[in-house]
């Protein structure tokens, strides 16, 4: 049947198929193979192509023989040593001269005719001598088959040449540039497009070296010469080269050496890759890593790196270095009230103002938030440092204009530490400047403070206090004592105020005045405050169960608890856990709680009132009270501050103030409690002024839970406070 070819089948493929069919129909064995060497000696041969006749000689199937070696297929590879040696000699010639040899392969002799189409490869025809001598026609047929094999080799070589041309086109189209160097008699010869990455061709190695950036040249030449002289097999480097337009581009150059038969590098080949865009991107990433994205100022890392260098120089030259820690006063209020966009604009303007008022060799950085740090080098004395600091502080004298109609007036607090007076490391100097800045804040803001070791000692005391408070929570070192509140008319108990005490294992019993500020600053007031509420509610529930106590339990709540803690949820959970009625709990809130966030505080007070909790305004008349917002507060009780009660005594003019507060409370239809009563004169006046309730040492000092229980028990039968 006639073979039908597909339309896309090439003449080369048809020829190859015909050739394979012809080889399968001849009686002689045909083998196309590759010699395997070890130290230049032929040791085996790989079967690349063969016909079925050859497979029978080996004793295998054609598909299993192709791709294998003689030694892999034969149990006695030594019997083929002579054949391998003969084929190895043929393959080493690399020409088409036909040589003959007789070989004993197993139990038969063969006449072998072989030639080499290219170095390392061979074509061999095996004729079995035990068969009758072939006719002249058969010999001619074999000769024709050999011619076909030669033609096929020519075709394969043409295809290889075509692939090389395609590869060359690909290399010319690629952004990566291939290069190679030939080592001839110890000289360097440049071939290919070695500098094509820079739009230059036919350049010598010397010209190439001249184009390398001066800062990179010595290093590049050293590495390349080691590679060229055979000291390293591989070459890799990144450097800059000058383009035709004079600009420098980054390239990545890599290469490998190829050795001759003597093991010496003969060809060095590699590739250039244009990595200029990559380097630009890396520079951008490095900038981002070392700069603040909002202000473009150096960040903490870059500041520390520069300060390190500055301190080393100052130590060598015996100079002073000042580190400033700057914080914008009341920035959080501005940020919260005007929005973060306005806050960001203030930070950008602040950075620009400060940068414009310091020396070129000083460093300004933003640590985060509204905190900036500066380093002043080459400072001769503290007077010069203070003069430079004043220039920075005065940057905030001019109002900040935000948009068309918004103007903000700001100030800053600055702390200063000095090398080597206060510290010698960057960490010490920044820490001490930070401490001094917080001292400036405590001093009223808009101030400059230079660090002193007295400040450090104060900070250390606060740190130890904070650590002690955390331990006190864990070890349950806190306790409550209670002071009763009396109805001034009936003399019976209205309620009890819970007062916190700390049984410090080293300092004894501490009152809130000794530790409450640290608790507020560190936020520990929130867990401590929740402990107080829970303990007070548990105790009140116990009194109700044991003595049928019907009075109030009063607990103080701080401004920090109202602003930062979820106080409403916390109280709700505690009441649920202790099963105390909300109407039995009274929350005392100081006037200064309303200083910063009146509306937010009022909303939380309304939530507490809706739960049935009573709310008392503590220390009334001493803080931020005004009649305007007093009407807005959802309060049940006013507590007259003890400083006004003290002025009731003879010789003082406080009676009118106390009378006014009592009248105001009566007009607003809310209860009034006078606290801090110490004398009978104060008691008599308050009773005469019709003050509803009183509290103080005159009636009862703060006492334990057990004594309050006894007091409640007695109060059920008779007045527990005799007049």
Image (cartoon, rainbow, N blue to C red):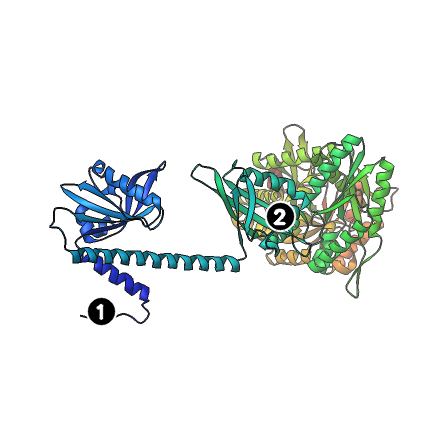
Looking at the image, the residue that sits furthest to the right is 651
Q: Earlier in the sequence, mark 1 or mark 2?
A: 1
Secondary structure type for disc 1: loop
Secondary structure type for disc 2: helix
Quote the CA–CA distance across marks 1 and 2. 60 Å
Q: How many other residues sit within 10 Å of disc 2, few (<14), some (14-19) or many (≥20)? A: some
Indicate the position of residue 210 as horizontal and vertical percent values.
Answer: 66, 46
Residue 697 visible, this angle: no
Residue 73 visible, this angle: yes
Indicate the position of residue 384 as horizontal and vertical percent values.
Answer: 86, 39
In the picture, which quadrant includes the N terminus? bottom left
Looking at the image, the residue that sits furthest to the front is 136
In the picture, which quadrant includes the C terminus? top right
The residue wearing badge 2 is 208
Residue 414 versus residue 134: which sits nearer the camera?
134
What number is the disc on residue 3?
Answer: 1
Residue 441, quarter of picture: top right
Indicate the position of residue 333 as horizontal and vertical percent values.
Answer: 73, 54
Q: Residue at x 76, y 46 (%)?
A: 641
Compared to residue 491, the image places residue 423 above or below, namely above
Indicate the position of residue 30 as horizontal and vertical percent values.
Answer: 23, 51
Q: How many other residues sit within 10 Å of disc 1, few (<14), some (14-19) or many (≥20)? A: few
Q: Is residue 569 left or right of residue 644?
A: left
What number is the disc on residue 429?
Answer: none
Compared to residue 284, the image places residue 227 above or below, namely above
């Amino acid at each position: 049947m006639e073979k039908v070819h597909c339309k896309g089948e090439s003449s080369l493929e048809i020829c190859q198929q015909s050739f394979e069919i012809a080889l399968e129909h001849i009686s002689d064995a045909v083998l196309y193979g590759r010699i395997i060497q070890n130290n230049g000696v032929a040791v085996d041969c790989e079967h690349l192509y063969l016909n079925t006749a050859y497979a029978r000689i080996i004793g295998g199937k054609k598909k299993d023989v192709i791709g294998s070696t003689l030694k892999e297929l034969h149990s006695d590879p030594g019997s083929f040593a002579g054949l391998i040696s003969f084929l190895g000699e043929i393959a080493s010639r690399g020409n088409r001269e036909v040589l003959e040899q007789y070989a004993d392969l197993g139990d038969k002799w063969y006449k072998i005719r072989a030639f080499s189409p290219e170095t390392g490869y061979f074509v061999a025809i095996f004729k079995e001598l035990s068969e009758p001598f072939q006719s002249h026609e058969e010999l001619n047929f074999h000769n024709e088959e050999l011619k076909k094999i030669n033609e096929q080799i020519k075709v394969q070589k043409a295809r290889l040449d075509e692939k090389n041309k395609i590869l060359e086109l690909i290399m010319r189209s690629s952004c990566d540039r291939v290069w190679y160097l030939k080592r001839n008699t110890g000289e360097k010869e440049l071939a290919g497009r070695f500098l094509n990455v820079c739009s230059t061709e036919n350049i010598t190695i010397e010209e190439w070296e001249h184009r390398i950036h001066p800062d990179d040249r010595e290093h590049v030449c050293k590495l390349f010469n080691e590679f060229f002289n055979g000291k390293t097999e591989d070459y890799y480097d990144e450097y800059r080269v000058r383009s035709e337009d004079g600009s420098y581009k980054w390239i990545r150059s890599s290469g490998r050496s190829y050795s001759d038969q003597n093991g010496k590098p003969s060809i060095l080949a590699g590739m250039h890759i244009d990595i200029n865009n990559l380097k630009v991107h890396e520079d951008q990433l490095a900038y981002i890593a070392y700069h603040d994205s909002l202000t473009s100022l150096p960040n903490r890392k870059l500041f520390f790196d520069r300060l390190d260098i500055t301190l080393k120089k100052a130590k060598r030259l015996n100079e002073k270095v000042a580190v400033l820690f700057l914080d914008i006063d009341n920035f959080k209020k501005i940020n919260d009230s005007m929005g973060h966009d306005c806050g960001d604009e203030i930070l950008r303007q602040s950075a620009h103002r400060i940068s414009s008022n310091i020396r070129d060799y000083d460093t300004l950085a933003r640590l985060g938030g509204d905190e900036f740090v500066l380093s002043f080098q080459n400072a001769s004395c503290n007077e010069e440092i203070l003069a430079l600091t004043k220039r920075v502080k005065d940057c905030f004298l001019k109002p900040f204009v935000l948009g068309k109609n918004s103007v903000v007036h700001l100030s800053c607090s600055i702390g200063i530490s000095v090398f080597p007076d206060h510290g010698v490391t960057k960490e010490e100097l920044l820490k001490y400047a930070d401490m001094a800045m917080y001292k400036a804040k405590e001093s009223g803001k808009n101030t400059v403070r230079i660090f002193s070791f007295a400040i450090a000692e104060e900070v250390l005391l606060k740190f130890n206090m904070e650590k002690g408070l955390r331990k006190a929570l864990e070890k349950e070192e806190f306790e409550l004592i209670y002071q009763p509140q009396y109805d001034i008319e009936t003399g019976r108990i209205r309620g009890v105020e819970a007062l916190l005490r700390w049984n410090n294992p080293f300092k004894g019993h501490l009152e809130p005045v000794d530790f409450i500020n640290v608790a507020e600053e560190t936020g520990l007031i929130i867990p401590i405050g929740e402990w107080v509420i829970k303990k007070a509610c548990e105790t009140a529930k116990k009194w109700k169960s044991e003595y049928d106590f019907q009075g109030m339990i009063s607990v103080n709540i701080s401004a920090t608890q109202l602003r930062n803690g979820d106080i409403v949820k916390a109280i709700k959970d505690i009441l649920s856990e202790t099963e105390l009625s909300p109407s039995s709990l009274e929350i005392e809130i100081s006037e200064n709680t309303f200083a910063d966030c009146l509306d937010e505080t009022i909303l939380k007070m309304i939530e507490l009132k809706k739960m049935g909790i009573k709310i008392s305004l503590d220390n009334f008349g001493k803080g931020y009270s005004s009649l305007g917002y007093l009407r807005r507060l959802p309060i049940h009780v006013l507590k007259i501050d003890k400083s006004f009660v003290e002025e009731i005594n003879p010789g003082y003019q406080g009676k009118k103030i106390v009378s006014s507060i009592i009248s105001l409370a009566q007009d607003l239809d809310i209860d009034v409690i006078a606290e801090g009563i110490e004398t009978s004169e104060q008691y008599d006046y308050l009773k005469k002024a019709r003050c509803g309730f009183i509290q103080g040492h005159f009636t009862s000092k703060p006492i334990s839970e057990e004594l309050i229980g006894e007091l409640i028990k007695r109060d059920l039968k008779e007045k527990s406070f005799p007049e």
